[in-house]
Image (cartoon, helix red, strand yellow):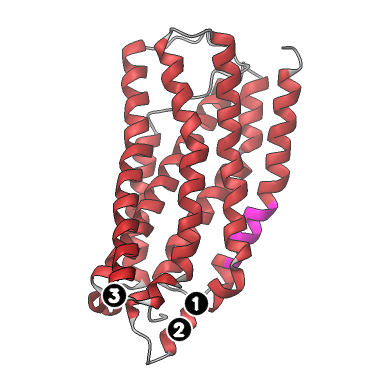
């Protein structure tokens, strides 16, 4: 077991070296090269969340390998929770946005503006900060000391809320929204919805997020169950935490593989023969 710290150090290092440049480039193309649309506003903030998370990975390593730095542990765990909540909430908001486009295209064409999306983004970040501010103790018990005092009842309640608000409820809302969009596309035979590039990217972001974060929640529930051996839970929690960073490394791939079409997507708003059923929007 003595090799585990070095092994996880290598994994975290690879995640940082792969994720930081990719997320930085995606942040550049979404922030500087795209036209200002409501969809671009949502995806830009999704990229910001990934970039903040991956760029703060060295802080996570510091909190793991230098256990006397309590402030680093708390800050790292808060950033981890902030990223999880912001990613889940932003994916939920984008999915609902797609659903509104399919359900009320006329209203969306008139009222769905970058300004409205900006306020929606602010509310999303405020909710994420509010939830994450109370979970600074949620650092995986992997290759770290578990001797710090915690209120057992409070921890169990917090982990449950963490799972419900940051995983299960967003997943349910996203699935409902996406199913409605796909159903509307099939019933209306609207090829514009099916070919909608942001929807394609979203269908890539959603499964990777929830699959990569599922082990994180599973091992926290196992951790508080106190019926499993701690060493194995510590190793499993460490791997689960690595998967959360892998998610932030995979997300840029969906943007980069579809970059050309995604950057052309707002131009369809200038075509008078196309309706807004696809999510096309007036460029402001």
Cα–Cα gap, marks 1 and 3: 21 Å
The majority secondary structure of the magenta stretch comes to: helix
- Give the magenta range: 21-29
**Percent coordinates x, y for residue 2 in the rendering:** 75, 12
Going from the N terminus, do you reach mark 1 or mark 3 first? Answer: 3
Residue 57 is inside the magenta segment: no
Task: State whether residue 4 is above or below residue 101.
Answer: above
Q: Is residue 38 above or below residue 231?
A: below
User: In the figure, is residue 166 to the left or right of 51?
Assistant: left
- Is 206 displayed left or right of 161 in the figure? right
> Considering depth in this image, is 66 or 267 the residue closer to the camera?
267
Q: Are marks 2 and 1 in contact (CB under 8 Å)?
A: yes
Residue linked to disc 1: 265
Name the residue tied to disc 2.
Answer: 268
Q: Image point 29% across, 79% down: which residue?
A: 109
What residue is pinned by disc 3?
Answer: 188
Please, what secondary structure does the residue beneath circle 1 have? helix
The number of callouts visible is 3
CA distance for labels 2 and 1: 6 Å
- Mark 2 or 3, nearer chain start: 3
Mark 3 residue crowding within 10 angstroms, few (<14) / some (14–19) / many (20+): few
Of residues 188 and 136, the one nearer the viewer is: 188
x, y percent for residue 235: 61, 19
In contact (CB < 8 Å): disc 1 and disc 3? no
Q: Can you give x and y, in whole percent of width and height, for residue 49 in the image?
A: 51, 49
Q: Residue at x 32, y 53 (%)?
A: 123
Q: Secondary structure at mark 2?
A: helix
The residue sitting at 48% across, 83% down in the picture is 267
Q: Secondary structure at mark 3?
A: helix
């Amino acid at each position: 077991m003595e090799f585990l710290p070095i092994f996880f150090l290598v994994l975290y290092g690879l995640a940082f070296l792969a994720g930081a440049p990719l997320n930085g480039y995606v942040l550049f193309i979404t922030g500087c090269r795209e036209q200002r649309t409501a969809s671009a506003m949502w995806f830009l903030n999704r990229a910001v969340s990934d970039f903040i998370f991956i760029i703060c990975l060295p802080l996570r390593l510091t909190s793991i390998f230098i256990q006397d730095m309590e402030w680093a542990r708390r800050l790292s765990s808060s950033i981890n929770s902030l990223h999880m909540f912001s990613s889940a909430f932003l994916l939920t908001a984008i999915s609902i946005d797609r659903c509104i486009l399919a359900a009320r295209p006329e209203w969306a064409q008139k009222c769905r503006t970058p300004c409205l999306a900006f306020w929606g983004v602010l509310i999303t970040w405020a909710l994420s900060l509010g939830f994450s501010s109370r979970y600074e103790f949620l650092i995986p018990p992997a290759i770290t000391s578990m001797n710090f005092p915690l209120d057992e009842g409070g921890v169990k309640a917090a982990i449950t809320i963490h799972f419900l608000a940051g995983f299960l409820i967003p997943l349910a809302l996203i699935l409902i929204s996406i199913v409605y969009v796909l159903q509307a596309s099939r019933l209306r035979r609207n090829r514009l919805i099916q070919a909608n590039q942001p929807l394609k990217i979203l269908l890539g972001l959603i499964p990777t997020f929830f699959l990569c974060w599922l082990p994180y929640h599973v091992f926290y529930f196992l951790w508080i169950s106190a019926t499993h051996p701690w060493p194995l839970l510590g190793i499993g929690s460490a791997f689960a935490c690595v998967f959360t960073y892998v998610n932030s490394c995979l997300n840029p791939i969906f943007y980069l593989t579809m970059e050309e079409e995604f950057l052309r997507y707002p131009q369809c708003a200038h075509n008078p023969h196309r309706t807004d059923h696809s999510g096309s929007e007036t460029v402001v």
